[in-house]
Image (spheres, rainbow, N blue to C red):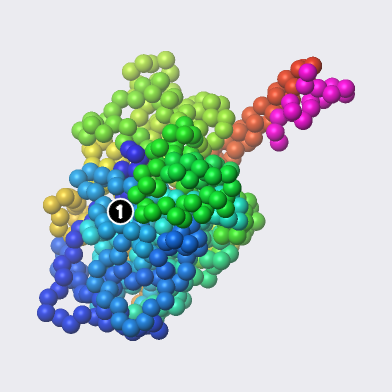
């Protein structure tokens, strides 16, 4: 559960102020009238002050309950007038404290809704940013009471849509067959994007200028939409922050997903033999508390934590037609311009929670602790983990630490895990998209925020810290956050890069008009190419670099897969030889029998 405290990196943002004495904003869609509310964005810099209309809790799908539980979403049908002035339900999830904050309810399976933020005055045919939240596919929400994308809409001059999707087992349980193929959460996201396509014009938006952006599992989801044929055409831009389809955590093997599904059934009183029987029983489990209580820690205890996430997207042959890495090789990537990147100290997400009391000084990680943590995390990323762990330690450990008991391996461990989980898969994805003829803008955030999500004084640019700047926290006065003027400028620039991708398909241009498109005080962001490997350093200087983590990513993306393949082949050879040597397990020709041969 410690990990979950830090995958919900979008639970804390500033409150907004309701404007008084005004008639509520109203839009008319094909289904009926939607009545919203008006917020006043009141930043530190009065020049950025702006009104933003918000339409909250708009349902895009029927409640996925009863016979619709664990099924694809069904578009919501309604008519008349909808009061969209308060947030809808959060999707069922564990209650996970994050610092001094805990996500509050209401929670409910009837949670599939979108929230729309429209800046005023609104430019004609405004571009649209659609946010897909992270949270390890198990926690999070498009919006909480303390997290609104008002600064993105106000500063970026774009419409912003945030969406909820089913989480945990409700969104990603799979029996690895046609009964519960899985990926309900991804289909929720797709249906929400279809809702944007069909309805955003009523809000003043342009359905042909839509960019989706997400962080962590949200970025993993977007990466999967990029290789999902059914999601093509629903967006023109994709922003992947610390996540992608090739990340080792982005999908779950089908056989593992099936074991988890039946294990969950056993834990909630639905021990059954067939997928049909399991589905029928799980659909009849009353409420959602019993499932939530058993779907994470208790379930993973059954498997010795062999997977980081008990429920995640699976390769079902339809939503995800094949292994994303194979689709990369085939160039089967949807047509969209992408921003892809990660942070300099991503791995501290996994290491930091192990030392909750170390807020002032960095904890000490000795060689044995390093080995234990490395093996633990590698065990669900690659097998056999032992040979990989030795190779990784050689790459990341300070050579001066050899044989020295007082060396601190903290940063070595964080860098190794961060590169494996986020940085290098992002590099791989940027290269694959580019090879397929898609335009890519790559970034790496090195800046250490004055205030970070983890809240201690010894981490660097850690997983989720980019969201502080994407969502404009440095622009707003707060008792909980402290930022500099340089960081405020960095936040404005980041928001504009993101918004410009939706507007023009180029983070440098707010308009395709040559004279009006280039904005002042927005440093040039070169296109990523296979020859130059240029990336934007997200920092107050907004400089450019080349070939981020080139040596490390060559190891993770090229060498480690070959090493694992060789080790697995050697293991099979040993098992075959052992079977041949077993006289009771060979036939007349001296080859292993069906009972003794290793499985292919």
- Bounds of the magenta segment: 584-600
Is residue 436 placed above or below 197 in the rendered structure? above
Is residue 348 placed above or below 370 in the rendered structure? below
SS label for mark 1: loop
Residue corresponding to mark 1: 10
- The secondary structure making up most of the magenta span is loop
Outermost residue on the right side: it is 588
Residue 600 locus on image (x, y percent): 71, 36
How packed is label 1: few (under 14 Cα within 10 Å), some, or many (20 or more)?
Answer: many
Quarter location, residue 457: top left
> At 21% across and 80% down in the image, what residue appears?
24
Decide if residue 69 is on the left or right side of residue 357: right
Q: Quadrant of the N terminus?
A: top left
Residue 225 locus on image (x, y percent): 51, 60
> At 18% across and 64% down in the image, what residue appears?
16
Residue 575 locus on image (x, y percent): 70, 24
Decide if residue 324 is on the left or right side of residue 355: right
393 magenta-colored:
no
598 magenta-colored:
yes
Decide if residue 549 is on the left or right side of residue 39: right
> At 39% across and 42% down in the image, what residue appears?
294
> At 37% across and 82% down in the image, what residue appears?
79
> Residue 323 versus residue 274: which sits nearer the camera?
274
> Residue 382 versus residue 510: which sits nearer the camera?
382
Residue 583 visible in the displayed image: yes
Quarter location, residue 143: bottom left
Residue 124 locus on image (x, y percent): 35, 83
């Amino acid at each position: 559960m410690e990990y979950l405290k830090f995958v919900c990196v979008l639970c804390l943002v500033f409150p907004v102020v309701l404007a008084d004495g005004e008639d509520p904003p109203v839009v008319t869609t094909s289904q009926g009238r939607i009545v919203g509310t008006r917020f006043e964005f009141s930043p530190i810099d009065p020049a950025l002050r702006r009104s933003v209309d918000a339409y909250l809790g708009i349902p895009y799908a029927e409640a996925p309950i009863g016979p619709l539980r664990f099924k694809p979403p069904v578009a919501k049908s309604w008519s008349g007038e909808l009061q969209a002035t308060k947030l809808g339900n959060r999707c069922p999830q564990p209650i996970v404290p994050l610092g001094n904050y805990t996500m509050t309810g209401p929670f409910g399976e009837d949670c599939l809704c979108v929230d729309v933020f429209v800046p005023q005055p609104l430019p004609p045919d405004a571009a649209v940013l659609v946010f897909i939240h992270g949270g390890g596919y198990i926690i999070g929400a498009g919006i909480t009471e303390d997290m609104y994308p008002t600064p993105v809409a106000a500063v970026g001059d774009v419409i912003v849509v945030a969406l909820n999707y089913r989480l945990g087992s409700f969104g990603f349980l799979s029996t690895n067959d046609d009964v519960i193929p899985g990926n309900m959460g991804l289909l929720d996201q797709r249906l929400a994007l279809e809702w944007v396509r069909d309805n955003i014009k009523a809000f003043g938006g342009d359905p042909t200028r839509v960019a989706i952006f997400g962080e962590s599992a949200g970025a993993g989801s977007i990466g999967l939409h990029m290789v999902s044929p059914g999601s093509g055409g629903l967006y023109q831009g994709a922003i992947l922050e610390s996540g992608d389809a090739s990340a080792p955590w982005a999908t779950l093997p089908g056989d593992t997903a099936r074991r988890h599904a039946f294990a969950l059934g056993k834990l909630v009183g639905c021990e059954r033999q067939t997928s049909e029987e399991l589905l029928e029983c799980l659909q009849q489990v009353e409420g959602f508390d019993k499932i939530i209580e058993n779907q994470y820690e208790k379930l993973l205890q059954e498997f010795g934590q062999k997977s980081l996430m008990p429920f995640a997207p699976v390769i079902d042959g339809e939503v995800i037609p094949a292994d994303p890495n194979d689709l990369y090789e085939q160039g089967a990537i949807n047509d969209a311009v992408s921003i892809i990147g990660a942070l300099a100290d991503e791995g501290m997400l996994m290491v930091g929670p192990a030392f909750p009391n170390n807020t002032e000084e960095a904890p000490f990680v000795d060689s044995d602790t390093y080995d234990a943590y490395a093996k633990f995390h590698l065990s669900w990323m690659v097998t056999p983990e032992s040979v990989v762990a030795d190779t990784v330690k050689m790459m990341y450990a300070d050579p001066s630490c050899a044989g020295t008991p007082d060396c601190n391996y903290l940063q070595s461990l964080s860098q190794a895990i961060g590169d494996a989980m986020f940085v290098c898969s992002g590099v791989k994805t940027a290269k694959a998209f580019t090879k397929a003829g898609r335009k890519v803008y790559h970034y790496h955030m090195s800046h250490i925020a004055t205030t970070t999500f983890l809240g201690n004084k010894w981490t660097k640019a850690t997983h989720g810290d980019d969201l502080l700047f994407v969502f404009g926290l440095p622009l707003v006065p707060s008792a909980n956050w402290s930022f500099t003027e340089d960081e405020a400028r960095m936040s404005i620039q980041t928001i504009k890069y993101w918004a410009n991708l939706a507007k023009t398909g180029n983070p440098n241009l707010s308009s395709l008009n040559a004279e009006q498109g280039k904005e002042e005080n927005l440093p040039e962001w070169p296109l990523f190419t296979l020859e130059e490997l240029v990336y934007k350093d997200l920092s107050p200087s907004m400089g450019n670099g080349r070939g981020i983590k080139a040596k490390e990513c060559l190891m993770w993306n090229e060498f480690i897969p070959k090493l694992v393949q060789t080790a697995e082949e050697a293991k099979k050879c040993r098992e075959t030889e052992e079977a041949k040597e077993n006289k009771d397990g060979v036939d007349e020709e001296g080859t292993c029998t069906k009972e003794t041969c290793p499985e292919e």
